[in-house]
């Protein structure tokens, strides 16, 4: 066994499948300097005996299943330089004198555990510390200001804890800091200006911390190395504090951060114009300005033109800002690397430029909830990598271009709530990757093309509130993975196909407000995933299938305003429905809780009841008849016997009398 190798200095067993516990006998290898058991499914507690390895420099037990507290003996290994327990289930507090016995410690990796308590202020005594990672734990209390005195610190991760209070201004003294992560805590106050004076800083994340206040006018004038900035989900406000009308304090940001790659300012209260100077950070790959109060200071969205300088840009989001400007033709000059363009809920005006087809790498284009007009540009055919296109809630008119059918990767197509006219293209079935199709609340006419019913990968189909007509074909049963089908508020006629019962995954079905007729198919009782079913406002007749009682997930049912008749089922989920579900069906009857008249049963139940009554009466009559017959027979028999006895008596008397005489 390895613990008999008394001169062993390095033991690396990482990335294996060792199970069980860490053997305490490892401490017998007194010469050991480097021990790495990371990435195994080891479990149990860390043996206290590990603290006897007095020459240990590196101890890595990361990404195992270790539990319990960290033995205090480990914090007394004075030779230790790197201590890594990330990705376990360790609990308990850190010792208040954590650094007293670790004078040479350079890296402390304790992220992703269950550690709690406060961060010891004594941490500053680890004067050689370069990396401190305590994120994704349950540390509480404030960030100790003493951290600011660890001048050697390069990486500091404190995110995803329960830390509170203000960010210590002393952290601006960390002159060698490269990466700072404090997001997802309960911090308050503003970001100390001193942090933005750390010239070595490349990454800062204080997202989702409830911070407030303003960003300094000379933000990052000294941190030119900054590559990633995450400030989203805070309450930061940038005021108009300079002489350039309408511009922000962030005006110089692009000039000061030539190496910036990712900038996330989303979910704040920034207002004013979006600085064109952002684009001077020419290495930008992602920028997120969403959920603020930015406006456009020109008729066109000029910041989009400025971003054409960012030739590496892959993600651009400016959603939920009251921009109220026109989408410029220059949108087609954005980086050909652009994959995600999000500009929804921004009051964007004008039409979609045909030049948008130049964005050949685009995967998602989302511009819903704007004031866009004009037609869908045919140039979208050039976006062959497009997977999602959302133009809902605009004022787009014209027809759906056939060129859309040439897409081979499109899975989400959302055109709802526009002014689109004409027919659904016959070729729609050619988009075999389609998973969601929403064209509801438009002005579509004609019938649903047959090719649509061949979309056996379609999950969601919403064509409601149009002027579509025709009948529903048996092929609707091909949509076997569909979870939502809404064809309501159209002009569909004919009967509901029985094949609809094949849609075992269907959760939500609405066929209301059409002119469908005939009976409700019994096969619909096989829709075992169904939660919402709306067949109201049609001309359906016949009974409500008793098989509906088997739909155990059904929470909403509406068959009102039809010509249904017969008794409403009472089993299954029906006891949870109200009169609203069945109103305006003159032939329906049933339980008073449904607001229906009682049933005057003429069906099989009534016949069975009548038969039971008849048989009972017949039984009584037969019994009485038999009793009377028996009584008569017995009476007659008795009378006959009495007459016989009398005659014999008379004969005997006469005989005796004759003998006497």
Image (cartoon, rainbow, N blue to C red):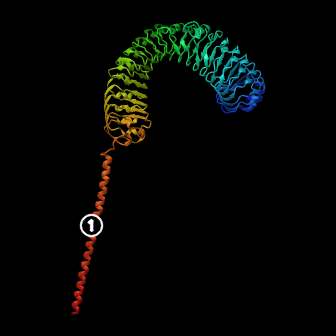
Quadrant of the image occupied by residue 653:
bottom left
Q: Is residue 657 visible?
A: yes
Q: Secondary structure at mark 1?
A: helix
Q: Is residue 105 above or below residue 637?
A: above
Q: Nearer the viewer, residue 163 or 634?
A: 163
How many numbered marks have been drawn onto this rendered protein structure? 1
In the picture shown, does residue 509 fall above or below 347? below
- Which residue position is annotated with label 1? 629
Mark 1 nearby-residue class (10 Å; few <14, some 14–19, many ≥20)? few
Determine which quarter of the picture holds residue 144. Answer: top right
Name the spot of residue 36 as percent of width and height, x first: 70, 25
Quarter of the N terminus within the rendering: top right
Q: Position of residue 254 (x, y in %)?
A: 59, 8
Vertical relation: 158 (above or below) 333: below
Q: Is residue 361 left or right of residue 397?
A: right
Q: Position of residue 105 (x, y in %)?
A: 74, 21
| Apparent side of residue 265 relative to residue 83 in the rendered image (left or right) | left
């Amino acid at each position: 066994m390895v613990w008999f190798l008394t001169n062993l200095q390095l033991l690396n067993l990482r990335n294996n499948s060792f199970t069980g516990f860490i053997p305490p006998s490892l401490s017998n290898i007194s010469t050991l300097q480097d021990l790495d058991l990371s990435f195994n499914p080891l479990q149990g507690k860390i043996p206290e005996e590990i603290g006897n390895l007095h020459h240990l420099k590196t101890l890595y037990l990361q990404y195992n299943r270790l539990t319990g507290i960290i033995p205090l003996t480990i914090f007394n290994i004075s030779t230790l330089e790197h201590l890594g327990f990330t990705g376990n289930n360790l609990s308990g507090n850190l010792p208040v004198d954590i650094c007293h016995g670790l004078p040479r410690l350079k890296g402390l990796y304790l992220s992703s555990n269950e550690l709690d308590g406060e961060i010891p202020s004594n941490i500053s005594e680890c004067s050689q510390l370069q990396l401190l990672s305590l994120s994704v734990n349950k540390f509480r209390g404030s960030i100790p200001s003493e951290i600011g005195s660890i001048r050697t610190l390069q990486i500091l991760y404190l995110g995803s804890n329960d830390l509170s209070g203000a960010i210590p201004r002393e952290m601006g003294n960390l002159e060698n800091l490269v990466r700072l992560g404090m997001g997802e805590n309960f911090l308050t106050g503003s970001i100390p200006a001193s942090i933005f004076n750390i010239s070595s800083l490349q990454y800062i994340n204080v997202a989702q911390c409830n911070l407030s206040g303003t960003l300094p006018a000379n933000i990052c004038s000294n941190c030119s190395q900054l590559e990633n900035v995450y400030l989203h989900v805070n309450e930061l406000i940038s005021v108009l504090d300079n002489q350039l009308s309408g511009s922000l304090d962030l005006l110089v940001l692009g000039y000061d951060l030539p190496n910036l790659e990712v900038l996330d300012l989303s979910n704040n209260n920034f207002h004013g114009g979006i600085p064109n100077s952002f684009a001077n950070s020419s290495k930008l790959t992602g920028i997120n300005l969403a959920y603020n109060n930015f406006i456009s200071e020109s008729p066109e969205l000029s910041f989009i033109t400025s971003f054409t300088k960012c030739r590496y840009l892959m993600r651009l989001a400016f959603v939920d800002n009251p921009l109220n400007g026109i989408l410029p033709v220059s949108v087609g000059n954005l980086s050909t690397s652009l994959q995600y363009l999000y500009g929804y809920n921004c009051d964007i005006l004008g039409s979609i430029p045909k030049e948008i087809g130049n964005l050949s790498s685009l995967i998602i284009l989302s511009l819903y909830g704007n004031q866009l007009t004009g037609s869908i540009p045919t140039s979208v055919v050039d976006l062959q990598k497009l997977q999602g296109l959302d133009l809902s809630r605009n004022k787009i008119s014209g027809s759906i271009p056939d060129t859309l059918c040439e897409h081979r990767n499109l899975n989400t197509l959302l055109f709802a709530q526009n002014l689109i006219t004409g027919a659904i293209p016959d070729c729609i079935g050619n988009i075999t990757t389609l998973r969601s199709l929403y064209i509801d609340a438009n002005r579509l006419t004609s019938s649903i093309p047959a090719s649509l019913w061949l979309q056996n990968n379609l999950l969601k189909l919403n064509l409601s509130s149009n002027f579509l007509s025709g009948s529903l074909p048996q092929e609707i049963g091909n949509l076997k993975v569909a979870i939502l089908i809404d064809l309501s508020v159209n002009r569909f006629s004919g009967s509901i196909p029985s094949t609809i019962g094949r849609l075992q995954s269907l959760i939500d079905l609405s066929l209301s407000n059409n002119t469908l007729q005939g009976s409700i198919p019994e096969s619909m009782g096989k829709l075992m995933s169904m939660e919402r079913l709306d067949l109201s406002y049609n001309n359906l007749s016949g009974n409500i299938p008793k098989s509906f009682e088997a739909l155990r997930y059904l929470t909403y049912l509406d068959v009102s305003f039809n010509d249904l008749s017969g008794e409403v089922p009472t089993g299954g989920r029906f006891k949870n429905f109200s009169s609203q579900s069945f109103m305006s069906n003159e032939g329906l009857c049933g339980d008073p809780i449904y607001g229906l008249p009682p049933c005057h049963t003429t069906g099989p139940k009534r016949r069975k009841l009548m038969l039971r009554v008849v048989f009972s009466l017949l039984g009584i009559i037969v019994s009485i008849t038999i009793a009377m017959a028996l009584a008569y027979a017995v009476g007659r028999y008795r009378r006959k016997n009495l007459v016989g006895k009398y005659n014999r008596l008379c004969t005997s008397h006469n005989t005796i009398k004759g003998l006497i005489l």
